[in-house]
Amino acid sequence: MNNKIDQRHNFIDKWLFVLDKKVYLLYQISITMKRRQFFKFLSMGGATLAIKPIINAANISGAIAQDTPIETNISDALKVPRNENSMPGKYPGKVVKIIDNKSVVDGVPQEDIAYTMLENAMLTLTGAASIESAWREFVSPEDIIGLKVNPVAGRLLTTSHAVTKSVIKQLVNAGIPKENIVIWDRREMQLHETGYDNDNYPGITITGTECMDQNGGFYDNDGNLYSMSRIDKDQYYYADIEGEYDDYTIPYMVNGGKYSYFSKICTDQVTKIINIPILKNTGRTTTLALKNLSFGAVTNTGRLHKIFHDCCAEICAFPPLRDKVVLNIADGLIGCFDGGPSAKPQFICNYNMIFVGTDPVAVDRVGHNVIVNKRIAMGVQTEDLKNASRFLDNAQKLGLGVSDNEKINLIEKIV
């Protein structure tokens, strides 16, 4: 029954997005609320609330090419001593790519195939004798493990449940208690919209920084954002660029000004992070491991699109991410090559691949190459522009991983 419902949602998603983006966004909200709550939401101006922040983010993303040097507090991050888990992790510059053309059938990622692909990748990455021992290189039963997924583009292009459930099954088989696993992203409501809920993941904690109450409200009776209790004001990324938001947008930014605060999910709640981004683009560059972490872990991100190449690298250099992300599993079963990081049906494709590495910069470089080659093949662009991946070079300078193609050890297997 659930599969039929999911298929109906996917069909409606695609056609609504083609016909009208605003209708599509309202539909995404409605499927997470009871009918009466949804119409109450509309009467209170919820339509504008839902649409405006997303449109603003899309507009800001066009400023990526207009970066200018600005002051940040990256020096604070560099002063903190690294540990054995710090990026680029146990296998710097090593990436394993597994391709199986049977991994997506009629637009649906196949969990059994994804499980085998992930198993193959983990064994190849580590050289371990068993999948259980491969996972135990990175996590232990004492860890609280945060799975950082990406549901931002809605049901059309979320981190697939096939990959996420495969990760969880292998973790549990490796002796990790379910109650020690947390699925998280920036916006809790988007997790629920895309099927990351207790019905699909019994026994797993599902949480986000930005959140609503059961009636779809962002504020408590005293006028305080619920999200404020979920941020850590002692740990932040400062950038000398102002974030100014109206009343509709502020719940999605949490705060304005020049500070972006880290989520308590990263600073307090989890001891290890497994990053599970999607293979997709934003303009001529890639939003994969580093973007999924940097823009997912802090508040006040609207302004940061203007310094995309700086902040994608610098935020990941702070201890809540640098010292906790032990593995990056890029979900490339389904992805996009244009129109990202949101989802446009005409640009969604089956890449039929998963690639895994501890080094987020190397993973991003491999993903960037895949997307650029696809864009060239589809006639979207004619060549790879050096400045399109400048954030990877920045990350390499910060010691987060390997950006140079010739220094990456890419192991590719076609099943």
Image (cartoon, rainbow, N blue to C red):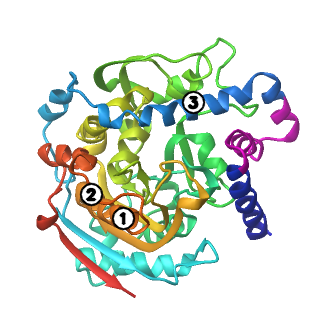
Residue that appears at 12% across and 67% down? 406
Residue at position x 56%, y 52% in the image: 343
| Magenta stretch bounds | 19-39
Provide residue 74's location: percent of width, then percent of height: 19, 30
Q: Residue furthest top?
A: 222
Residue 53, disc:
3
Q: Residues within 10 Å of mark 3 (few under 14, many from 20)?
A: many
In the picture provided, is 374 more to the left or to the right than 400? Answer: right
Query: In the depicted view, which residue is nearer to us: 278 or 350?
Result: 350
Q: Quadrant of residue 326?
A: bottom left
Q: CA distance from mark 3 to mark 2?
A: 30 Å
The amino acid on which the numbered mark 2 sits, given as a three-letter code, is: Asp
Residue 132: name its quadrant.
Answer: bottom left
Lower position in the chain sequence, tag 3 or tag 2: 3
Q: Residue furthest right?
A: 36
Determine which of the numbered discs, if any, sits on residue 384 in the image: 2
Q: Which kind of residue does numbered mark 1 sit on?
A: Ile
As for residue 24 lying within the magenta part, the answer is yes
Q: CA distance from mark 1 to mark 3?
A: 31 Å
Q: Which residue is mark 1?
A: 376
Q: Nearer the viewer, residue 344 or 214?
A: 344
- Nearer to me, 282 or 190: 282
Count residues near mark 2 (Cα–Cα under 10 Å), then give few for <14, some for 14-19, many for 20+: some
Amino acid carrying mark 3 in the image = Pro
